[in-house]
Image (tube, helix red, strand yellow):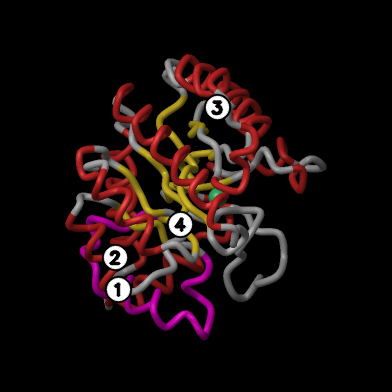
Amino acid sequence: MIFESHAHYDDKQFDSDRDKLLSSMQANGIGRIINVGSDFAACKRTAELARQYDFVYGAIGIHPSDIGDLSEEVMEWLKETANDPRIVAIGEIGLDYYWEKDPQEQNTQQYWFGRQLELAREISLPVIIHSRDAAEDTLKLMKNMHAEQIPGVIHCFSYSAGMAEEYVKMGYYIGIGGVITFKNARKLKETAAKIPLERILLETDCPYLSPEPNRGKRNSSLNLPYVVKEIAALRGITEQEVEEATWENARRLFSL
Ligand code: NI
């Protein structure tokens, strides 16, 4: 069975067939799914999905591109809602300088990233971290905040193998998805071959980032076998070994 550690089934791209698709997952080898909130509305829908399907769990947190949604009231809502045993992580939270070039707004991202890290520490939940074009500031902020004391995953990892090793040293997991099947994903292939298997999580980030041969189409967890196959080939191990190890890794991180 495959453990999908990062999906967005709340997305409107799934409105036409969400129930049909989710109901087909377990028969197709997708045993568990973490649905991850991004903006406030997505967090609310995530909590609903996690209550609706027994194999779906939720992560709630505000994505750096959506911090306009954040306030003390929303922080309070996150804290309260995270009491629900179906909510197993805070995320996705982090920094995104690809979409945000204004240094003042980047500071605001750092502020709310820090606040949500603190929340996770306070309520003893792991974090799901989004970091894009912000390698240096993400690592600096996490080191300053002693994030090595908070379990978590760097989702959709896009930096160097050296940077992945820094995070592994801090006890973090590395989320690997469809990008690994792209021909030009040299850094990610190197990372997936090098870091300990005990630190890899499988993810789609669906509906985005479909792997080859479905690149460009709507993604879903049903495409994860392509990711498994690529990781197995890169490491010279079987696909079953990849599935089993990543299943155990996700169970460990999310305490399931
Ligand atoms: Ni995501």
Q: Is mark 2 within 8 Å of ligand 1?
A: no
Residue 136 place in picture, x, y as percent:
35, 63
**Kind of residue at disc 1:** Ala
Residue 201 place in picture, x, y as percent:
36, 54
Report the Cα–Cα distance between label 3 and label 1.
33 Å
Circle 2/circle 4 CB separation < 8 Å: no
Who's the residue at 42% across and 44% down the image?
128
Provide the residue designation for mark 2: 164
Task: Provide the residue span drawn in magenta.
Answer: 178-201
Classify residue 238 as left or right of residue 38. left
Provide the residue designation for mark 1: 161
Q: Nearer the viewer, mark 4 or mark 3?
A: 4
Q: Could you say whether the residue bearing mark 1 is in a helix, strand or loop?
A: helix
Q: Is mark 3 within 8 Å of ligand 1?
A: no
**Kind of residue at disc 4:** Ser
Circle 2/circle 1 CB separation < 8 Å: yes
Q: For the C terminus, which image quadrant?
A: top left
Who's the residue at 58% across and 31% down the image?
70
Please name whichever residue, 129 or 142, is drawn nearer the observer in this view of the structure.
142
Disc 4 or 3, which lies upstream in sequence? 3
Relative height, residue 114 to residue 153 (above, below): above
Disc 2 or 4, which lies upstream in sequence? 4
Classify residue 215 as left or right of residue 254. right
Residue 140 place in picture, x, y as percent:
30, 55
Provide the residue designation for mark 3: 50
Relative height, residue 185 to residue 46 (above, below): below
Determine if the magenta segment contains residue 192.
yes
Report the Cα–Cα distance between label 4 and label 3.
25 Å
Relative height, residue 48 to residue 206 (above, below): above
Provide the residue designation for mark 4: 131
Relative height, residue 26 to residue 40 (above, below): below
